[in-house]
């Protein structure tokens, strides 16, 4: 609704530290302090080089190439949709270089377990590769992978910018009980995940070790699924926004940031 956002410049905001503290006190959020998923796109304003996405592997690649570089040819079909039964999941985001420059034509090869936690090592179920577009964006449509013994929930991916080394890594889900016991788990690889209807919408930005110059217009975080909430806007107590089809009332004045979307921070936003 028009006029719901308050864009006044009042600086009655609270610090990130205070917010995190408030969020932890207000609700048993599954994330521990320091595990809050952060999107690389939001670091662009800092002017500092981004931290590359870390390596992570558990040897589940069904057909690993004998040598992975410099020209990786994935065995999987090129597709953005991995069909199958289970809880619908989309994973979207950007691939950046070290200067937060979007990287186009980056190969992203995804593979994961099925709903029951099994990998298909014979055909190509739940395997597929795609390339980032001119804005460095990607979107994978799949299901939430099932659990298998010894590991927390994860999605495998190999990422390779043209002519650059391959990054083999995994993406994780916040709030998974096994995150705290899985020795391979890395909180730097947590996606931002929200529930939409019966499905999940996840966001993750990859950072590859590719030098470059900062873009003039770095991408921002539009609310997935639409809504009036926006990162960067200063909200005051009582303001109302919509996000993902729901309406929220601001409980504490703050400047919105990606990762602080209304469903993620009950200390700041009350679901109406
Ligand atoms: Fe695995």
Image (cartoon, rainbow, N blue to C red):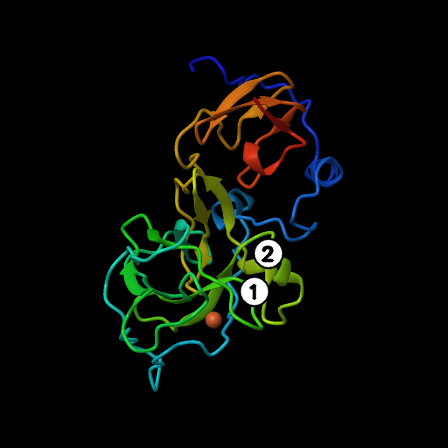
The picture places residue 245, in percent across and down from the top left corner, at: 43, 28
Q: Is mark 1 within 8 Å of ligand 1?
A: no
* Residue 44 visible in image: no
> In front here: 110 or 253?
110
Tell me the number on the disc at residue 136.
Answer: none
The picture places residue 77, in percent across and down from the top left corner, at: 23, 67
Quadrant that contains the C terminus: top right
Quadrant that contains the N terminus: top left
When the figure is inspected, residue 55 is found, relative to residue 92, above or below; the finding is below
Residue situated furthest left in the rendering: 78
Question: Which image quadrant for residue 253?
Answer: top right
Cα gap from disc 1 to disc 2, whole angstroms: 7 Å
Residue situated furthest top in the rendering: 3
Tell me the number on the disc at residue 176.
Answer: 2
Q: Is residue 132 left or right of residue 191?
A: left
Q: Is residue 87 left or right of residue 232?
A: left
Residue receiving disc 1: 152
At numbered mark 2, what does the secondary structure look like: helix, strand or loop? loop
| Residue depicted at x 48% and y 41% | 195
| Residue depicted at x 40% and y 76% | 61
Q: Is residue 13 left or right of residue 49?
A: right
The picture places residue 271, in percent across and down from the top left corner, at: 58, 26
Q: Are the residues tagged 1 and 2 within 8 Å (C-beta)?
A: yes
Q: Residues within 10 Å of mark 1 (few under 14, many from 20)?
A: many
The picture places residue 267, in percent across and down from the top left corner, at: 68, 32
* Residue 251 visible in image: yes
At numbered mark 1, what does the secondary structure look like: helix, strand or loop? loop
Q: Residues within 10 Å of mark 2 (few under 14, many from 20)?
A: few
Mark 1 / mark 2, whichever is N-terminal:
1
């Amino acid at each position: 609704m028009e006029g719901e956002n308050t864009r006044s410049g009042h600086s009655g905001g609270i610090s990130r530290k205070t917010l995190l503290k408030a969020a932890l006190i207000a609700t048993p959020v599954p994330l521990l302090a320091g595990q809050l998923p952060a999107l690389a796109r939001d670091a662009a304003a800092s002017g500092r080089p981004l931290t590359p996405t870390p390596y992570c592997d558990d040897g589940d690649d069904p057909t690993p190439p004998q040598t992975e570089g410099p020209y990786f040819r994935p065995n999987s079909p090129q597709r953005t949709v991995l069909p199958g039964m289970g809880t619908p999941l989309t994973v979207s985001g950007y691939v950046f270089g070290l200067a937060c420059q979007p990287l186009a034509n980056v190969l992203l090869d995804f593979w994961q377990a099925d709903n029951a936690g099994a990998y298909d090592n014979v055909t190509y179920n739940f395997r597929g590769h795609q390339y980032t577009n001119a804005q460095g964006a990607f979107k994978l449509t799949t299901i939430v992978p099932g659990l298998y013994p010894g590991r927390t929930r994860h999605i495998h991916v190999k990422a390779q910018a043209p002519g650059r080394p391959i990054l083999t890594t995994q993406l994780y889900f916040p709030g998974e009980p096994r995150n705290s016991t899985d020795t391979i788990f890395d909180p730097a690889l947590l996606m931002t995940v929200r529930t939409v209807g019966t499905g999940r919408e996840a966001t993750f930005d990859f950072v590859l070790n590719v030098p470059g110059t900062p873009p003039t217009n770095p991408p921002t975080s539009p609310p997935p699924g639409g809504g009036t909430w926006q990162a960067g806007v200063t909200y005051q107590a009582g303001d109302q926004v919509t996000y993902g089809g729901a309406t929220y009332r601001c409980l504490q004045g703050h400047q919105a940031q990606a990762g602080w979307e209304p469903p993620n921070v009950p200390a700041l936003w009350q679901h109406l």
